[in-house]
Image (spheres, rainbow, N blue to C red):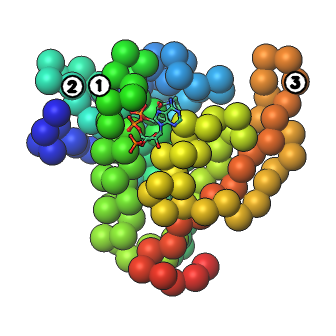
Amino acid sequence: MTSAALRPLRAEDADELARLEALVEPTPWTAKDFLDVLKNDWRGRVLEADDGSVAAWAVVMPNLDEAELLTIGVRPDLQGRGLGRAMLDEVLRLIDGENRICCHLEVRESNLRAIRLYETSGFVRVGLRKNYYRTADGRENAVLMRRENGGASC
Ligand SMILES: CC(C)(COP(=O)(O)OP(=O)(O)OC[C@H]1O[C@@H](n2cnc3c(N)ncnc32)[C@H](O)[C@@H]1OP(=O)(O)O)[C@@H](O)C(=O)NCCC(=O)NCCS
């Protein structure tokens, strides 16, 4: 995987991204959600595998001088090989380059892999939303996390 494989999200990715999201997310984004990223001028990034197929993706929503990481995922057969970290590094570079003072996100409390990834990339826990997400047999909490750019506070 090379840095040349990282590129902006395109309209023609929408169906494939929706298919992949459904494999990794309990409440997946739809193709329309991905098309709305372009319509709203949010930041979408795709990491291509060597054969040109989608390996990983992420979407960031700018919000005044802050940003929110809305979704990030890696194709199931390619997880655990550093692609999630590469994707997160890319969007954090993007956010820092736009001088956004911080980045927020929400993550399921049970998603220890993602939480570990975020914590090792500078995110800290700043709150908890009780029973925020649906699960197969009930509800679970959302952990709220924030990473500050250059030590600024928000
Ligand atoms: C979460 C996700 C994006 C991580 O991507 P990945 O490519 O699998 O992860 P990476 O190989 O880049 O590993 C990144 C870090 O995750 C953590 N991690 C990876 N595998 C882990 C595991 N089995 N248990 C705990 N932590 C783990 C480690 O901190 C790792 O960093 P390290 O390799 O420096 O130790 C990916 O697994 C995914 O798509 N999961 C389903 C969708 C999802 O949960 N998205 C986030 C919603 S908030």
Sooner in the amino-acid sequence: mark 3 or mark 2: 2
Estimate how packed mark 2 is, as few (under 14), some (14 to 19) or many (20 or more) residues with alpha carbons within 10 Å: some
Q: Amino acid at mark 1?
A: Val
Is residue 141 rendered to the left or right of residue 109?
Answer: right
What residue sits right under mark 1 in the picture?
Answer: 54
- Label drawn at residue 49: 2
What distance separates the C-alpha of mark 1 from that of mark 3?
A: 32 Å
Question: CB of mark 1 within 8 Å of CB of mark 2?
Answer: yes
**113 or 145, nearer to the observer:** 113
Estimate how packed mark 3 is, as few (under 14), some (14 to 19) or many (20 or more) residues with alpha carbons within 10 Å: few
**62 or 79, nearer to the observer:** 79
Q: Residue at x 79, y 54 (%)?
A: 128
Quadrant in which the C terminus is drawn: bottom right
Image-quadrant location for residue 52: top left
What residue sits right under mark 3 in the picture?
Answer: 138
**Rendering coords of residue 85 (x, y %):** 37, 44
**Rendering coords of residue 68 (x, y %):** 54, 57
Q: Is mark 1 within 8 Å of ligand 1?
A: no
Q: Residue furthest bottom?
A: 152
Estimate how packed mark 1 is, as few (under 14), some (14 to 19) or many (20 or more) residues with alpha carbons within 10 Å: some
- Label drawn at residue 116: none
Sooner in the amino-acid sequence: mark 1 or mark 2: 2
Above or below, 125 relative to 73: below
What distance separates the C-alpha of mark 3 from that of mark 2?
A: 36 Å
Q: Residue at x 49, y 76 (%)?
A: 101
**42 or 133, nearer to the observer:** 133
Q: Amino acid at mark 2?
A: Ala
Image-quadrant location for residue 26: top right
Residue 132 visible from this viewpoint: no
Is residue 120 rendered to the left or right of residue 125?
Answer: left
Q: Amino acid at mark 3?
A: Gly
Check disc 1 and report its element: helix, strand or loop.
Answer: strand
